[in-house]
Amino acid sequence: MKTMLQQLTDLVSAAFEACGYDPALGRVGVSNRPDLCQFQCNGALTGAKLYHKAPFMIADEVAKKLQDEPIFSKVEMVKPGFLNLTLSDEHLAKEATALAASETLGIPQAENAPTIVMDYGGPNVAKPLHIGHLRSAIIGESLKRIARAMGYRVVADVHLGDWGLQIGLVIAELSERHPEWRCFAADFDPNTEKVPALDVDLLNEVYPFASKKSKTDEAFAEKAHRMTFELQTGNPGCTALWQEILRVSIADLKGSYEKLGVDFDLWYGESNAEAYVEPLLATLREQNLLHESEGAQVVDVEEPDDKAPVPPVIIKKSDNSNIYATTDLATIIQREEDFHPAAIWYVVDKRQGLHFTQVFRCARKAHLVPEDCELSFLGFGTMNGSDGKPYKTRDGGVMRLSDLLATVEDAAAEKMNQSSFVSAEEQRDTARKVGIAAIKFGDLINHRSKDYIFDLDRFLSFEGKTGTYLLYTITRIHSILEKLGVDDRAPITLSGVYTDAERDMLLNILQTGEVFTHALDEKAPNYICENAYKLANLFSSFYHDNHIATESDPVKQQNWISLCRLTSRMLQKQLDVLGIESVKRM
Ligand code: ARG
């Protein structure tokens, strides 16, 4: 299904061509004077220069050609040479009916399902999932769903931080607490011996403790580095303990992500890139890109136009250990080998921008991916507390995600109308969904690159640009349909338009496909949030002004019911790509 603007552009381009002008002049956009018309084309203004003719003359000719098109209720030339277009209500109703019948609800589909590898989440094993990783999960999940809704094949990789110093710190600390554990002995045999079972509570306590200790205790810090190195070079005891840490951590992470409605196709981590480090070094050497600098192996990546210095990428440190960039480069080789993606997107804190500039430049220099493979860093801003500083717990610590979710769920439960629920379970489940909707919408309504303030009261408000308001709108529609005993599986047919609000709703619905395109182009879900909010708002005024249940004209009433159903579907489709589940009552 072509989008509304594509259809109009085709028609107007043909009219330009029939009048002897370049069809490319026929591009149609949404009107910036909705009081005058719905759509406009400014091609005659450009054409005037090309054809040395007054723009209004060109626009007038084209307008005459379009005059008899039945889809328009008004085609107007407005000086100096605008072409103002308004669609007939019959056409809007017909298009909306077709959209309702299409499986994709009019969302444009990519050709040949290009593959995008998406790297988001990025939690660090052995550390509890904290709110710093919340934004990556929320934004990444939404971008994944938008791309999938548009016909892309997306491979989502959580890309665990499972190979770095944080593991060394935990292992070092455990070795001090339990020197008797067999895994710390030189003759430990992983084939016949087991490491003791760990649990998340222990890990949650050990990591911060060890991290703090390493800052003051030099010998301990040294030990943690040594343990990291031992792990990375295959020491059997460290490896066995690491596997136990992974087992416990991943089970916990999976639970948290599941609660958030975020899911991944791959649970790879930095450790999976280890096998590609040697091939990476070989490629870099082969292409003469590696050179030594202060004992480290580096690749230069600065470019003449750089406004700020871009230091060389360190591939091997002087102690022969790998670092973050090494892993990311090796992972690019792996992803290329496994998926030949058209694009790799990284949804990571924007403060890591320089790291990705270095990594991408090095990947390009070394031709790790074909030239037409897009490498994009989608940086996001910080979630701040009401003091404008990164969100913290009351005692100033980093808030664990599970604590945050529990707080939000309780706050949501308090806001809801208890009496509308049949069971306590349903109420709890709804509170969870409302809470998640509040957090996700509160995040996604901001352009991802911006910082925002986490304000739970505002996010849970029934008014304004909130997830709560959108869910509430859907429950209102649900309750009308239920009251009237409407079968929501029947085809949706619209026959006409009776009020201005309906026309505006149909225009919004028919342009939602374009909003998806824009959101994907910009890799920014906030455009979908805004669009869905607009539709909910239009619905509110429509609902306020018209009494659907008591309407005596059956044709009108049927039409309104159809419009309610279509609105609900469009809202749910948009919430779905935001990663938000809707509810029936609240
Ligand atoms: N684990 C990293 C962190 O906590 C984020 C990983 C992002 N992805 C990547 N490919 N570097 O900062």
Image: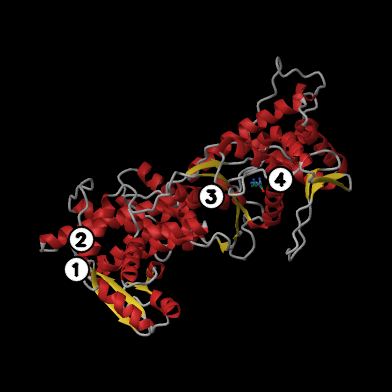
The residue under label 4 is which amino acid type? Ala
Disc 3 residue crowd, few under 14, some 14–19, many 20+, Cα 10 Å: many
Q: Amino acid at mark 3?
A: Gly
In the rendered view, would you say 196 is above or below 332? above
Q: Earlier in the sequence, mark 3 or mark 4?
A: 3
What residue is shown with label 3?
140
Discs 3, 2 touching: Cβ within 8 Å: no
Q: x, y (%) of residue 510?
A: 32, 61
| Above or below, 308 relative to 294 | below
Alpha carbon distance from label 3 to label 2? 36 Å
Q: Which residue is mark 1?
A: 498
Pair 4/2: label in front: 4
- Tag 1's secondary structure? loop
Task: Determine the residue positioned at 58% across, 64% down.
Answer: 386
The amino acid on which the numbered mark 1 sits, given as a three-letter code, is Tyr
Secondary element under disc 2, as helix, strand or loop, is helix
Total marks in image: 4
Mark 4 to mark 1 CA distance (whole Å): 62 Å
